[in-house]
Amino acid sequence: PSPVTVIRKEKTSRNSVSLSWQGPERPNGIILDYEIKYYEKEEQETSYTILRARGCNVTLNSLKPNTAYLLQIRARTAAGYGASSPSFQFETSPDSFSISSESSQVVLIAISSAVAIILLTVLLYVLIGRFCCHSKSKHPDEKRLHFGNGHLRLPGIRTYVDPHTYEDPSQAVHEFAKELEASCIAIDKVVGA
């Protein structure tokens, strides 16, 4: 058979690696199995391990953490072994959790979704809280309080000015409330004059 040319690393962990590959382009018969030969890159084939696999995938176990390995695969038919694949290099993880490209994308999407949901929940809570607090007044007259053109309208407040102090009641009101505009002042009735 022709050599295996496409090898993929599917999943990497601290002590194992899962690999898959495509069968040879020209099998020259029925593929009986595959021989997988791997060794540490630094050992330079002085010490290697050989595994056999019937399918196009294998998991290599009992590997050293954070170590580079080289791997070669060759197919076997009834006529014998084919040529070995070019050396494929892979490394084990330095950390204790498993990493795969598919699962890392799923984890990233899940975390992003959770953060988005939390932010939306907080935003809705703040917006609903603002509207609820403004509509729930303690006193029924407080609902009518509002600002219009930068002025605050105070309902039902009347000021009493003693008319005995001044001869003209309007002069008393103007001196009592100097910061008010004259057009906003109204004398309802003069008591005790």
Image (tube, helix red, strand yellow):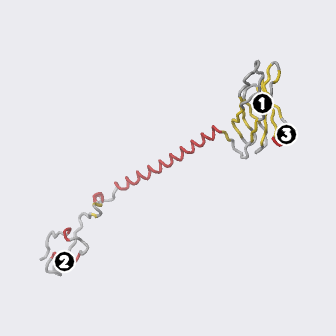
Q: CA distance from mark 2 to mark 1?
A: 108 Å
Q: Amino acid at mark 1?
A: Ser
Residue at which label 1 appears: 85
Q: Amino acid at mark 2?
A: Ala
- Indicate whether 171 appears above or below 13: below
Which tag is nearer the camera, tag 2 or tag 1?
Answer: 1
Q: Amino acid at mark 3?
A: Gln
- Bin the neighbour count of mark 2 within 10 Å (Cα to Cα): few under 14, some 14-19, many 20 and up: some
Pick the quarter of the image with the C terminus.
Answer: bottom left
Residue drawn at 81 percent across, 18 percent down: 78
User: Which corner quadrant of the image does residue 81 belong to?
Assistant: top right
Residue at which label 2 appears: 172
- Bin the neighbour count of mark 1 within 10 Å (Cα to Cα): few under 14, some 14-19, many 20 and up: some
Tell me, yes or no, whether the two marked residues, 2 and 1, touch with CB atoms within 8 Å: no
Quick check: 108 left or right of 94?
A: left
- N-term mark: 2 or 3: 3
